[in-house]
Image: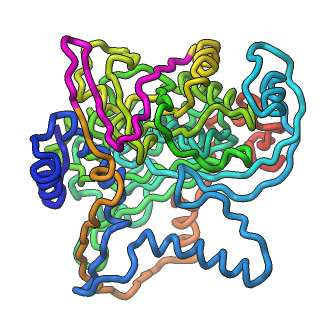
Amino acid sequence: RGLGFDAFDVAYYAKLFADELGRDPTDVELYDMSQSNSEHSRHWFFSGRQVVDGVEKPKSLFKLVKATLEAARTAAAEDGRPDVSVVAFEDNSSVIVGGPARVLAPLDAVSADEAGAGGAYGPGPLRETAKTLHALLTAETHNFPCAVAPFPGAETGAGGRLRDVQATGRGAFAVAGIAGYCVGNLGLPEHAIAGEEATSALPKPAHLATPASILRDASDGASDYGNKFGEPLVLGYCRSLGLADDGRGDRCEWLKPVMFSAGVGWLDARHCAKNPAEKGMLVAKVGGPAYRIGMGGGAASSRVQSGENAALDFDAVQRGDAQMLNRMNRVVRACAERGAANPIVSIHDQGCGGNGNVLKEIVETEGAAYDLGKFTVGDPTLSAVELWGAEYQESNAVLVKPDAKAFLEAVAARERCHVDFVGEVTGDGVVKVIDARDGPEVTVSELPLKLVLADMPKKVFRSETPSANTTPLHCGGLTARGAAKMVFGLPCVCSKRFLAHKVDRSVTGLVARQQCVGPFQLPLS
């Protein structure tokens, strides 16, 4: 099944089950660990111990990145400036201080906000109200899926990033998107790019899309998703690179592309922090039904792509459903618009690892009991492994108090969005999953969170500083005009309209004025 365990993983989980739990792992638990704790999900390399040229570095790569925030805060304090960072390195997005704003919200939401508690819910007029709103930015890449299937890979990249916005704090709002692509040498028949001939005869993985098709189909996928969901795409970038020799005798090319998706949004200043899980709270899944889609994405994204894993790679690609995400977004919005009466205690988006990841994270460190029979499924033949581990789209996990159940069900029914109350917080620190769909109740997974999610040991990564063999630059008979023509023909320099301007930038009223004018649709307005 392409679990993707390395030697460290095998040793750790063998010791965990033999010494700590005293039993063999179930299939569900093995699959869960392989995806939820993959490199893709846990960022082992960035958070691990780095040994370079035999000397261990004092800080991990993550600590180096986070040090920039501490330096900025120190500088602000020394200059007498306020710290404007609200959320950083601890949620799905970064958030900075915004300010007061006048917004429109349904009358029942405004009344509930003013009362600080639940209240009437139903159709009604919009009312202008004052709120303090903070700005957010989130970004992610969706590289491996775009290499295998560019259109669905990019659309689910955009969808995953939109769910990151939704699941910031206790519910946030999307405003606009950004897309970027880094691919290998394009090899366009009608447009020769200088230097590409160096890699034209080199082999390429047969099951991966060509760089030119990735640019075309992936940008179609991201724009198509934004149009259907209702998010304008306002910026884009593109790079192509392929070197037969990087100076060390190694080929360097973006055969596995970078599909970059970013977005800006806003959220109520009172909703920036997720609240902790407490015993007795309910865990709900909001969004689309479960399908056998996106199996093994965590492991597939964490390994080098090769022809031997082609079948596993195709199984791991998700399928986007922008209409369902729009419905789910309206459910989240209806909750967040209630301000002080927002029923969402915590919200997490479902991504890599499927239910096995998101339903553990949302109840950390308290634990919960889940019943697979309570999930809405689009395919009744799903096994326990598939239902617990598939990355089906579009889905979020929401934590609420019991008295908010009726409200959430009413909102979901209005928006024609599934909501399944699949479990309850137990307070014992264990996530237990039962399955009684096809017979007597069976425990398919029972894992203590402190052993599989919290303070796991760091992996050690060893590397050597390479010595590059550089060669002098020879321009031959190149003229200034010829050089300028070559430079302006590069994708990183030429117009990006073919990437960013295929989307409807005024969808759902999120853009007050169309920014592109004239026959060439230049963003000058």
| Residue 207, position as x, y percentages in the image | 24, 41
| Residue 497, position as x, y percentages in the image | 63, 46
Residue at position x 32%, y 31% from top? 390
Q: What is the span of residues highlighted in magenta in the rendered image? A: 417-444
One can see residue 327 in this view: no
Residue at position x 84%, y 33% from top? 114
Residue 60 sits in which quadrant?
bottom left
Residue 12 sits in which quadrant?
bottom left
Asked if the stretch drawn in magenta spans residue 439, the answer is yes
Work out whether residue 224 or residue 298 is closer to the camera in this orientation and state it.
Answer: 298
Per the picture, the main secondary structure of the magenta-coloured stretch is strand
The quadrant of the rendering that contains the N terminus is top left
Asked if the stretch drawn in magenta spans residue 100, the answer is no
472 with respect to 51 (left or right): right
Q: Is residue 202 above or below residue 517?
A: below
Q: Is residue 162 above or below residue 406?
A: below
| Residue 9, position as x, y percentages in the image | 18, 56
One can see residue 357 in this view: yes
Work out whether residue 362 or residue 151 is closer to the camera in this orientation and state it.
Answer: 362
Residue 437 sits in which quadrant?
top left
428 with respect to 160 (left or right): left
Q: How many marks?
A: 0
Residue at position x 75%, y 14% from top? 122
| Residue 312, position as x, y percentages in the image | 21, 37
Q: Is residue 260 above or below residue 346?
A: below
Residue at position x 62%, y 30% from top? 332
Q: How is the image coloured?
A: rainbow
Q: Is residue 164 above or below residue 86?
A: above
